[in-house]
Image (tube, rainbow, N blue to C red):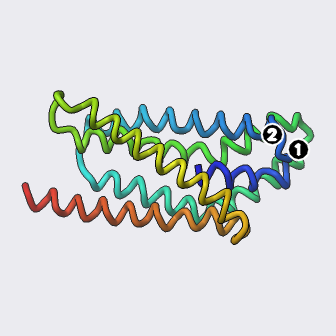
Amino acid sequence: MWLEILGSRLLAPFFGSTVYVWGALLSVFMGGLSCGYAWGGWLADRRRRFSDLTTLFRVAAVLALVLPLAGKAICSELSAWDAEPRWLALLASTLIFFVPCALLGAVSPYLAKLAFSGPERVGTLVGNLYAIATVGSVAGALFSSFYLVAWLETSRGIMLLAVPLWLCSLLCRALDRQQAERI
């Protein structure tokens, strides 16, 4: 949600903040997450290592650092095209946000696979993962809209997202080392 809210501010100078822009942005985020869920589930069934989560978080963190500059360049280029602004906003949203959303979407099914200990508790496990993800989304939405927008320019707010993503990668790396020691 942090990226989504600040992403709307990245698009606004070029495409406005109309319902079309928001519709494009929401659709790309949901589509990216959906693809990420499917890909993450597929990947988790083939490889069950925390090192893969480390990589997912690190790539997402690096993307958060370059996304503002690349996003502005993409928006600037596309906004100069002589085409329907709704479709340009959708194309810009896709080019800028689809891959980061897919990477982050892959995390939940991968975590479920790593945490799975038996079918008798799968409902609790998945429910807890959804609950944690939703609480994180609420916190990200409130933090970005109530504080980051007032404190930082949009680009720096997006780049700041790299910090919790990198911290998650460090946690996964530590868990990977702990898992390797048990083997």
Residue drawn 78% across the image and 40% down it? 21
| Res. 94 image quadrant | top right
Residue drawn 20% across the image and 32% down it? 121
Q: Secondary structure at mark 2?
A: helix
Residue 129: x percent and y percent? Answer: 36, 41
Residue 88 is labelled as 2
Above or below residue 156? Residue 48 is above
Q: Secondary structure at mark 1?
A: loop
Residue drawn 50% across the image and 42% down it? 102
| Res. 93 image quadrant | top right
Residue 54: x percent and y percent? Answer: 35, 58
Residue 1: x percent and y percent? Answer: 58, 49
Residue at the limit of the structure toward the bottom, as seen here: 151
Q: Nearer the viewer, mark 2 or mark 1?
A: 2
Amino acid on which the number 2 mark rests in the picture? Leu
Name the quarter where the C terminus is drawn: bottom left
- Residues at badges 2 and 1 in contact (C-beta under 8 Å)? yes
Residue at the limit of the structure toward the right, as seen here: 82
Q: Gap between marks 2 and 1, in whole Å?
A: 8 Å
Q: Mark 1 highlights which residue?
A: 81
Above or below residue 65? Residue 120 is above
Residue drawn 52% across the image and 38% down it? 33
Q: Is residue 107 left or right of residue 85?
A: left
